[in-house]
Amino acid sequence: MSIEVRKVSKTFGTYTALRDVSLRIASGELTALLGPSGSGKTTLLRIIAGLETPDLHPETSILFHDEDVSGRPVGERRVGFVFQHYALFRHMSVFENIAFGLRVRPRGERPAQAEIRDRVLRLLKLIQLEGFGNRYPSQLSGGQRQRVALARALAIEPKVLLLDEPFGALDAKVRKGLREWLRRLHDEIHLTSVLVTHDQEEALEVADRVVVMNQAKIEQFATPAEVFHQPASKFVMEFLGQVNVFQGRIHEGQAHLGTAAFDVAGPVGGQTGEATLYVRPHELDIARNSNCVPSLPGRVTRVHTAGPMARVTLLGVDGKDIFVDLTPQRFSELNLQPGETVYVSPRKVRVFSPDYQI
Amino acid sequence: MATATLTTAHSQPLGRVSTGEPVLVRYALIAITFTFLGLFLLLPLAVVFVEAFREGIRAYFASFNDRAAWSAIKLTLLAAGIAVPLNLVFGLAASWSIAKFEFPGKSLLISLIDLPFAISPVISGLIYVLVFGMQGWLGPTLDALGIKVIFAVPGIVLATIFVTFPFIARELIPLMQEQGTDEEQAALSLGASGWQTFWRVTLPNIRWALLYGVILANARAMGEFGAVAVVSGSIRGKTNTLPLHIEILYNEYHTVAAFAVASLLALLALVTLAAKTAVEWRVHRQQVASLEPTSAEENPS
């Protein structure tokens, strides 16, 4: 079941949550809506679900499998919605929570008692909480509650699964375990799913495609590898992982920083002028001397080795910090000491268009 | 100082939060509280029962063997029986709209609900006299239609509704605000209708607060004196409620009868207190349960 959103805007009073957003999510994919808080990602998810109505506009529509569902209320859209704070029915047992969507069906469509029971037990097995049916939500841990919420959403055999920051309220270890489990579950059931998150690591790890949102608009819609390696805008570049930002100039297709000139990744269009240059920490190398390679001098201020990469912090000539990630091998070869002056050379320099056109 | 430290160390294993006051201060405060409660609450309550039984059990029960007394009991039950269900519906509607919707005039509505708490019961009664009385706005019209409100049962019911009006809404609003609308949204997304959502999700979540509000509203409905006195006119056997009946008996020096009927109201208060404690205990137990998650296996594998 594909999901398509066409020209959706949403304003709350004077605040614009979404500005003319269009998006098509392919059937069977797990898509992450990623962005900082206030970027409009949760509003978009709630509009897809039908929990929120978009601003009235003749060209606005929401389609499930190319069928317009804009006019249908949430209960008729057959969406499984998982809330950030679980929203489990606190006075019902886990079993009754999962059975709820089946029990409230009109008499003619309601499955028989035995079938409801079968289905709930199958779902309890799926979420690995067999034997927890008689517990109450208050007797479960956060991770267990979220899995119950997921089973409750799946019980109505939804056409799409929508998850609003499902792991946001859980601690780091639990969320990591749960998102790997969610990915495996998705590979098993192949339900078109949309997940809202503000955690870039979560989005890149779990999703087939990532929608990066900022200030009520979509910045980029691509695979995790693409958004990470070929960010479409400054915002995506800065939001996905740490980045070193330098103020330099573009001249004859090259980036100039102080006296050094570097090649730029991607087209710069023969423009000239002031520009902001972006380099990721792992795309910088350190050398003891400049060796005629274009490079920037810096003084080592801090070395942090407790991680898969060694993080070296340098103080550049402009007084700003430069972060460099080195592999452990490279780091031990260099044997850097705080206070040393070294030379950093970028392997890849990025420039984003609106910036140097000024 | 040494004593204080020692006491702190002793009281902690008992599970009490120690704020570190010297033991003397603590006992003095407790003693003052008990003396005060004893003098001003328990003693008068005891007097009610002692006076009621002063001339023996026979005289006590004889006080109820009287047409006027029965009529007062019936009227009190009638007024409470109408006021409490009406305020139940009103309280639910008001707290639902305040807690779950955004609309202009919301804070004004909250203040209006509190109005009966803020003004004197006598004024509450007078308001109705001024509106429905013979010299009031609607009095002559109603009189022409043959409807009597003031110095009749409808006036008593209206005054009772007015004074008990905030109890249920006041209990529900903070609870419903705290619970938010997540569960209702979840129910709707699972295909439940609005009605199903109300009966299966909203109502069970607020049932204890609702019951608590009903108990308080009922106690006030049966015990109200001031507002009812103004609109009732105290026509014996017709417009007397229990509190008014007691006053008349006392003024006429029927001390035993007055205290006997008073003991009935006092008994009602005690039953209310017991019911209230039971509900509070129930709510507390629920809260404790929700604070103790059993963290069994956390990571699915």
Image (cartoon, coloured by chain):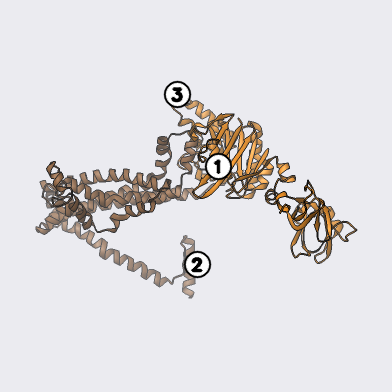
Return the residue at label 2: B9
Q: Residues within 10 Å of mark 2 (few under 14, many from 20)?
A: few
Query: Which residue type carries mark 1?
Result: Ser
- Element at label 3: loop
- Element at label 1: strand
Task: Single out the mark in the foreground, 1 or 3.
Answer: 1
Residue B139 image offset from top left, x and y in percent: 15, 48
Quadrant for the C terminus of chain A in the image: bottom right
**Alpha-carbon distance for marks 1 and 2?**
63 Å
The reply to the same-chain question for discs 1 and 2 is: no
**Alpha-carbon distance for marks 1 and 3?**
38 Å
Q: Residues within 10 Å of mark 1 (few under 14, many from 20)?
A: many
Return the residue at label 3: A108
The furthest residue to the left: B252
Q: Quadrant of residue A143?
A: top right
| Colour seen for chain B | brown
Nearest the eye: A135 or B205: B205
Residue ID at (68%, 47%): A201
- Element at label 2: helix
Residue A158 vertical position relative to residue B33 in the rendered view, above or below: above
Return the residue at label 1: A9
Query: Which residue type carries mark 2?
Result: Ala
Q: Quadrant of residue A315?
A: bottom right
| Colour seen for chain A | orange
Mark closest to the chain's N terminus, 1 or 3: 1
